[in-house]
Amino acid sequence: MTQAELAKITGRERSVIARWEQGSVSPSIDNLLAVIHACGFDLPLALVPRDTSQDEDLEAGRLLSPERRVDRLLKRVGRGEPDG
């Protein structure tokens, strides 16, 4: 779908859609839902309890270089561990 087509379906300006695509601005939740609906999808929103149990592990992994992350993943796969 082109920006012009999406603009027509959603009633938003094509220039606004271009800025979303470029990442220079983020769409509001209402605009995001309009785009999702225009594409034939729905995004059910539900509040769930926040799970912070893996935050420390995720932060430690984020600090690793991409090469080190791949090394760790390959070692886990070799041992048959889940990759989470």
Image: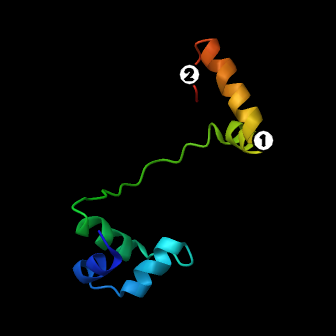
Q: Are marks 2 and 1 in contact (CB under 8 Å)?
A: no
Q: Is residue 35 above or below residue 53?
A: below
Looking at the picture, how far across and down is residue 24, in whole percent?
57, 78
In the drawing, does residue 80 fall left or right of residue 17? right
Camera-side residue of 80 and 15: 15
Q: Could you tell me the amino acid type at mark 1?
A: Ser
- The image's colouring method is rainbow
Task: Name the residue that disc number 1 marks.
Answer: 65
Q: Residue at x 78, y 44 (%)?
A: 63
Looking at the picture, how far across and down is residue 60, in whole percent?
76, 39
Which quarter of the rendering shows the C terminus? Answer: top right
Q: Residue at x 47, y 75 (%)?
A: 20
Task: Name the residue that disc number 2 marks.
Answer: 82
Sequence-wise, the earlier of marks 2 and 1 is: 1
Looking at the picture, how far across and down is residue 55, in whole percent?
66, 42
Camera-side residue of 35 and 67: 67
Q: CA distance from mark 2 to mark 1?
A: 20 Å
In the drawing, does residue 18 fall left or right of residue 37? right
Q: Could you tell me the amino acid type at mark 2?
A: Pro
Q: Is residue 13 above or below residue 26?
A: below
Camera-side residue of 58 and 7: 7
Identify the secondary structure beneath mark 2: loop
Identify the secondary structure beneath mark 1: loop
How many residues crowd around disc 2 within 10 Å: few (fewer than 14), some, or many (20 or more)? few
Looking at the picture, how far across and down is residue 39, in whole percent?
25, 64
